[in-house]
Amino acid sequence: MSAINRLLDVMSQLRDPENGCPWDLQQTFKSLIPYTLEEAYEVADAIERQVADDIRDELGDLLFQVVFYSRIAQEQQLFDFEQVAHVISEKLIRRHPHVFADDKIDSVAAQTDAWEEHKRQERAGKQKNNNVASALDGVALALPALNRAQKLQRRAARVGFDWDEITPVYDKVQEEIIELKEAHKNKDQSSIEDELGDVLFAVVNLARFVDVDAEAALRRSSQKFERRFHQVEQAVAAQDGDMKKMSVDELEQIWKNVKQHE
């Protein structure tokens, strides 16, 4: 028995109405969503840590989510795992005519453009009720906010809704910060939230212009802060100190020392 068939058989037993696992039996498409997102982030974490065994294990957990959804769908006579695998194979062949047909692609950038054009045509083919297809169709609402913002901006840029160079992008960030300061001065909480969102959106656009993934950049900065903060805690503990009783200036000096010695 192949490994994938064994996994499908394990899933079948877990969902057996009489002898299956009570927890697995009560799961639905919707209830699995948080677990699927968690597993995807754990894959990303394992990759960041560059631990091959952990990457393998986390990919297995993520694959199990696909098998789980497919099993639920099979029970509802919607589709099964075989169909899921078939659909993705057909999609990949269709979107890679330079590999599986006679099209010629000269660069990664050209391949990306061709890929997006194939996706656009597929989305247009799914439009119903004669609605006009939007360049933003299909950007999932459940994406992390930074990822979704950057994806929306890239889609808009592909149809020409974009600046020609980076200077106005920096200007836009400054403009949004000024508007945030004004909202804060007026103590209008709704406007503060709105303007802060605009600041973040503008910064994400800046990330796109400098060819940086905003989500990855923020994750990297968070990890850096976490690492340095742990060192600050250790430095304070070495002095038998208490962070709560120390002044901001004292903590700032320790923070600067940590940065300097990294």
Image: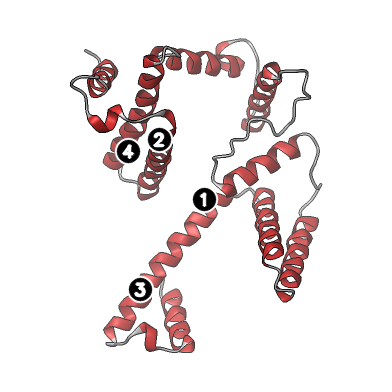
- Whichever of callouts 3 and 2 sits on the residue coming sooner in the sequence is 2
> What residue is disc 4 on?
58
Query: Is residue 194 visible to the viewer in this orientation of the structure?
Result: yes
Name the residue carrying label 2. 31
Amino acid of disc 4: Glu
Task: Calculate the distance from the C-alpha at mark 1 to the C-alpha at mark 4.
Answer: 19 Å
Quadrant housing the C terminus: bottom left
Q: Which residue is mark 3?
A: 231
Residue at 61% of width from left, 43% of height from top? Answer: 148
Asked if 50 appears above or below 8 in the picture, the reply is below
Relative horizontal placement of residue 179, taking residue 233 as reference (left or right): right
Query: Circle 4 — which element?
Result: helix
Mark 4 or mark 3, which has the lower sequence index? 4
The type of residue carrying mark 3 is Gln
| Distance of label 3 from label 1 (alpha carbons) | 23 Å
190 lies left or right of 58: right
